[in-house]
Amino acid sequence: MKLKVVTLNVAEFLPSNEADATTWTQQRSLNHFAHHIVHDADVVCVQEWPKSPSIGLDKKVWMVSDFVPSHCGLCAVMLRRSTFKDMDTVGSEGKHSVPCATVLATTHCGLVLLVSSVHNTPFGTEEASRLRNLTIIVDNIIKPFGLPSIIAGDFNMRAAEDPSATMLLRLKDSFEEAGSPKEKKFTFNTKINRYHENSRRYNARYDRIYFSNVKGGCTRMSIIPGSFDLVAHTKITDGESGNKFFLSDHFGLTQSFALETITKHNTTKTNSDHKLLKHREKSPLSSSLSPSSSPLNTPTTKPTSSFVIKDQSKKSKRPSSPIGPSSITTTKKDKKMDVITIIDSDEEDD
């Protein structure tokens, strides 16, 4: 089977400096995200999700992980119900103080993998902190399960830090696996994206999609990378004001994966099998492993991919009250919207 993964730092859906706040609101940013960025995704990793109690997801379409706080906003994993039957949050028992949300994701055909959404420490001087966090995520949360994994998000890593992930932690980088295409390199480019009015002009590859296949153990599936691309890297045209602007200060990434089963003749349970079983037995979310026993997994008809929030007419200030996911009603797509393509710079990181 195939999966489409999307990761994006959504900048709390606050309107860009280049947007007209009288016509383009947080509401419309959220709708654009739903209808144009993740409308065909199976797995969505978000960072800087708003802490506002007025924001939620349509639970008829998505299963949502615990929301985990980072230095700015929240990070979470979202799984499309038509692709996945179970979601089990892991690594949130208080043992690991790292900015990531991780889930055990089970497809309708019974394949299981781990998915993490990461929002790592910013600033060039925090290389040691980023390596510490990523090491904890891989060694303490991911590896004990012995399952294929996808780790995506805003890593805030600089080019010099690449070997720490690909060589030290033995993760595969989707960008590198795709041949390191220059036109898809930069996910942060203030030379063309003036989301923040007074930001310095530079570009960097802060956002990544890593994946890992486990050799031996209980692995009965392999993750094979397919097409790789940028998302949210084109300007939106506001049909009411005529303004053109980007959805976020980051560009996102999308990666398709093929999940291939591996035939094994040895049916003896391994340590990883027992780790998975033990976690599910003690997890407070273990009841969610049965679709019929959890309200999150109640089958519904005519799903929609809309996200909505309360109407706002001015630019929002970053709210501060933490929340979990909440259900809300859905709205129709925005009218009068088109996009124009922006070709990214081909320069190196600052």
Image: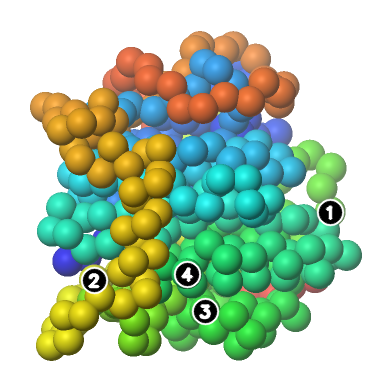
**Residue nearer the viewer, 287 or 71:** 287
| Cα separation between marks 3 and 2 | 17 Å
- What SS does tag 4 mark? helix
| Cα separation between marks 3 and 1 | 31 Å
The residue tagged 4 is 144
Q: Are marks 3 and 2 in contact (CB under 8 Å)?
A: no
Q: Is residue 82 above or below residue 276?
A: above
Q: Is residue 26 above or below residue 188?
A: above
- For residue 256, which quarter of the picture? bottom left
| Cα separation between marks 2 and 4 | 21 Å
Amino acid type at circle 3 is Leu
Residue 88 percent across, percent down from the top left: 37, 47
**Residue nearer the viewer, 87 or 120:** 87
Q: Nearer the viewer, mark 3 or mark 4?
A: 4
Q: Which mark is residue 191?
A: none
- What SS does tag 1 mark? loop
Residue 39 percent across, percent down from the top left: 30, 43
The residue tagged 3 is 171
The residue tagged 1 is 200
Residue ID at (73%, 67%):
132
Circle 2 Cα neighbour tier, 10 Å, few/some/many (<14 / 14–19 / ≥20): some
Q: Is residue 150 above or below residue 59?
A: below
Can residue 307 be seen here? The reply is yes
Amino acid type at circle 4 is Pro
Amino acid type at circle 1 is Arg
Residue ID at (57%, 66%):
140
Q: In the picture provided, is 200 more to the left or to the right than 190?
A: right
Q: Earlier in the sequence, mark 2 or mark 4?
A: 4
